[in-house]
Image (cartoon, rainbow, N blue to C red):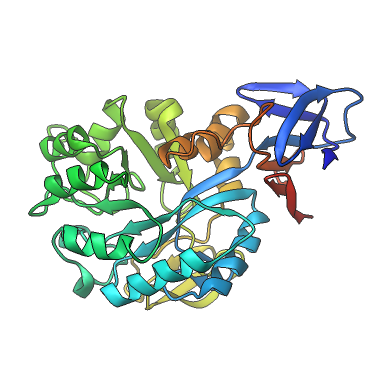
Amino acid sequence: MGRLGVAAALVGDREVPGDVTIEDGRVAEVGLEPAGAAGLAVPGFVDLQVNGFAGVDFLSADAAGFERAGAAMAATGVTACQPTLISAAPDALRAALRAAAAASPPVRILGVHLEGPFLSPAWVGAHPADHLRDPDLALVEELRGEGPLAAVTLAPELPGGLDLIGALVERGIGVRIGHTDADASAAHAAFDRGASAITHIHNAHRRFAARDPGPAGVALARRDVRVTAIVDGVHLAPETVVLVHRAAGGRLILVSDAMAAAGLGDGSYTLGGSEVEVREGRSTLSDGTLAGSVGTMDGALRRLVESGATLAEAVHAASREPAVLANRPELGMLEPGSPADVAVLDDRMRVTRTLVAGREVFAS
């Protein structure tokens, strides 16, 4: 592709003046003079929890739907993602995994994230309660035979939960705890068995208390656990975002938790078969329960900076840290030799271009 035409690039935590060159799908050089006219090149964003986008619900989408959603996500700086399936009937999960396996979207699919059905009835959130079930390795084995199952969110306190964590880790499947009523002891046990992250901290899990900090307190206190957060202006108060960022530091991971309405607007949509109303940026079931988000990764980046993070810290939370959690350490960075998955930001931190493996997949 040659020169990218940017004024600077974010390389690690340093803003390097000058242009970027791309050859054979990889970053060749940074800091070239003369610099381009404008724009800051940053590593492309990696969204590890996205239920749908631009009218597409991944649970019911065909391969073409995955491709349409991926094209829309690219406009928000996303270069890689883990499509997320909420609790559903096994046949629906199998079909969605097959569709993901057949899809060729413009952004990378880093496997599918199964959020449920091994979740606590006490913290069901927007998941259909009739599809919840106890941990079941046989079901997981069936599902991974249908498509690229990469990560599972589960409640470790359920019968067989800890054993399932161990079995998943042995099979190379990432485990996150969420929608859980685990106390601090159970959360520690889950992380000791190999769970590596908490799903959307401070949402849909046992609450933090002085003598039982629960899964959130344990995740923030342990240096070996990553913390995913929905920073969409709805799921977390601004003060909570500040506190989570200060406590988690470089372990913080931004996720969109986007559903089909993301990128569209107010109206009626579905999330895993449930009716969802979107009004003024808030997506809810009929009883008012939050049901996913209409937030985007670039919006989360801007909100995190508004909360006091540096741009480098926010980009790390949107790109490098999620890539490492997804076991794709070659992604989420911008330096010579790395895959040219790049988002270009203007001076308001808005995405103007997105490239995947050096190929332009979005231009404003």
Give x and y (percent) for residue 314: 56, 34
Is 159 situated above or below 248?
below
- Please count the marks in the image: 0
Instruction: Compare residues 288 and 118 and report the one nearer the observer.
Output: 118
Q: Residue at x 44, y 31 (%)?
A: 245
| Residue 310 visible in the shown view | no
From the viewer's perspective, tell me whether residue 149 is left or right of residue 73. left
Q: Quadrant of the C terminus?
A: bottom right
Instruction: Compare residues 351 and 332 and report the one nearer the observer.
Output: 332
Q: Residue at x 51, y 69 (%)?
A: 260
From the viewer's perspective, tell me whether residue 103 is left or right of residue 82. right
Q: Residue at x 58, y 41 (%)?
A: 301
Give x and y (percent) for residue 225: 31, 32
From the viewer's perspective, tell me whether residue 6 is left or right of residue 343. right
Is 324 situated above or below 168?
above
Is 9 situated above or below 352?
above
Give x and y (percent) for residue 201: 34, 44
| Residue 144 visible in the shown view | yes
Residue 336 occupies quadrant: top right
Residue 324 occupies quadrant: top left
Instruction: Compare residues 300 and 93 and report the one nearer the observer.
Output: 93
Q: Residue at x 30, y 64 (%)?
A: 143
Residue 315 occupies quadrant: top right
Q: Quadrant of the N terminus?
A: top right
Give x and y (percent) for residue 179: 25, 54
Query: Hey, which residue is sitting farthest left in the picture?
Result: 159
